[in-house]
Image (spheres, helix red, strand yellow):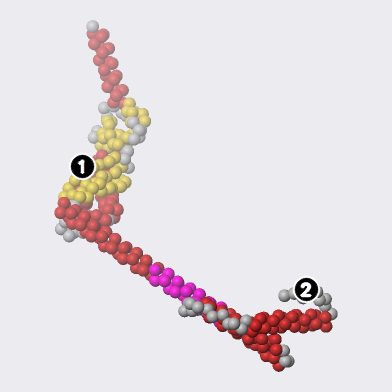
Amino acid sequence: MEMLVFAVLFVVLAIVFVSSTVIIVPQGRQFTVERFGRFTHALQPGIHFIVPLIDKVGRKISMMESVLDVPRQEVITKDNAMVSCDAVVFTQVYDPAKAAYEVENLQLAIINLAMTNLRTVIGSLELDQVLSQRDEINARLLATIDAATTPWGVKVVRIEIKDLTPPANLTDSMARQMKAERDRRADITEAEGSRQAAILRAEGLKQATILEAEARKEAAFRDAEARERSAEAEAKATQMVSDAIAQGDVSAINYFLAQRYIEAFAQLAASPQQRTVIVPTEMAGIAGALEGIKVLTETAAAQARADVVRKGGTVLPTTGKS
């Protein structure tokens, strides 16, 4: 019986000895070792052996990045507006000895430090700046809190404001202001569109007027050129008739008179006020005029053939019929 009790006692002592001697540190953590209550060194992840009854594990520090929620609080801005805000802080321990022995409650200290600095930074800005410059607020908070936590062996990786809520009356005023601003922009845009449309219409009318004037100018030029050609042809015909008369050719006179006679008769027949057309009884005059035209034409053709023969050309035979 005594042997059994001794064996059990030995096993218990062995377990206690092994548990106080062999230390296994998990990944992402570090343990501090104290010898008679004084810090000696830190244990890295893995298996370690310490002197039993002399050394012991002091603090178990997490070396992983941790997240701390900053409680919501009411903050007064520079222009005396009350806003409700909260934040989140990301921290990481880089020195386990300082984190274990420089501050009593590390997480509580960081949270209170973030709350006080959040009130300080937001209190130095106006409401419009607080709502529009969140990145600047985060940067200022990060620089201040990181400098304050350096003696504690903690690195503040980043800090973010989660929510900024102004009072309900300010929210309504901001909504009305935003609506008024959007209405103003819409009116300006509509006015700009109307002005641009009017400018484009005026420009189009201007171009159309210019093109129409150019068209009238070109038409007038063409009409003048046609009248000039017609006048030249008329002058040439008159000269030919005058030359024929000077040579004693009566048929030229008959051609000229017949042309004027026919033109006058055509105008008389085409007049809208003329209901009755009087046909002259002396139709022999018209026949004589036509005969004069025929003789004049044959004479001109004979003269042209004679000119070709003098130049050594070949004259095609004519039928002699008109």
Measure how far apart labels 2 and 1 are at the Cα level. Answer: 132 Å
Give coordinates of residue 31: x percent, y percent. Answer: 30, 34
Would residue 312 be found to the left or right of residue 99 on screen?
Answer: right
Residue 238 magenta-highlighted: no
Q: x, y percentage for residue 199?
A: 38, 70
Identity of the residue furthest to the front in this view: 281
Query: Which quarter of the figure has residue 48?
Result: top left
**Which residue corresponds to the image point at 29% horizontal and 24% vertical from the top-left?**
19
Q: Main secondary structure of the magenta part?
A: helix
Task: Answer left or right for 243 relative to 124.
Answer: right
Residue density around tag 1, few if under 14, some if 14–19, many if 20 or more, within 10 Å = few
Disc 1 marks which residue?
108
Q: Nearer the viewer, residue 293 or 83?
A: 293
Q: Is residue 220 above or below residue 193?
A: below
Left or right relative to 169: residue 320? right
Is disc 2 placed on a helix, strand or loop?
Answer: loop
Q: Is residue 69 visible?
A: yes
Above or below for 208 versus 249: above
In the rendered view, tell whether residue 91 sits above or below residue 232.
above
Q: What is the residue that sits farthest to the bottom in this orientation?
A: 246
Residue located at (18% from left, 49% from top): 84
Residue 89 locus on image (x, y percent): 27, 45
Q: Residue furthest top?
A: 1
Give the residue type that dot 1 points to: Leu
- Asked if the residues shown at circle 2 and circle 1 are in contact, with their CB atoms under 8 angstroms apart, the answer is no
- Relative side of 94 to 296, left or right: left
Helix, strand or loop at mark 1: helix
Please name which of the two marks, 2 or 1, marks the residue nearer to the observer: 2
Q: Which residues are magenta?
A: 201-224
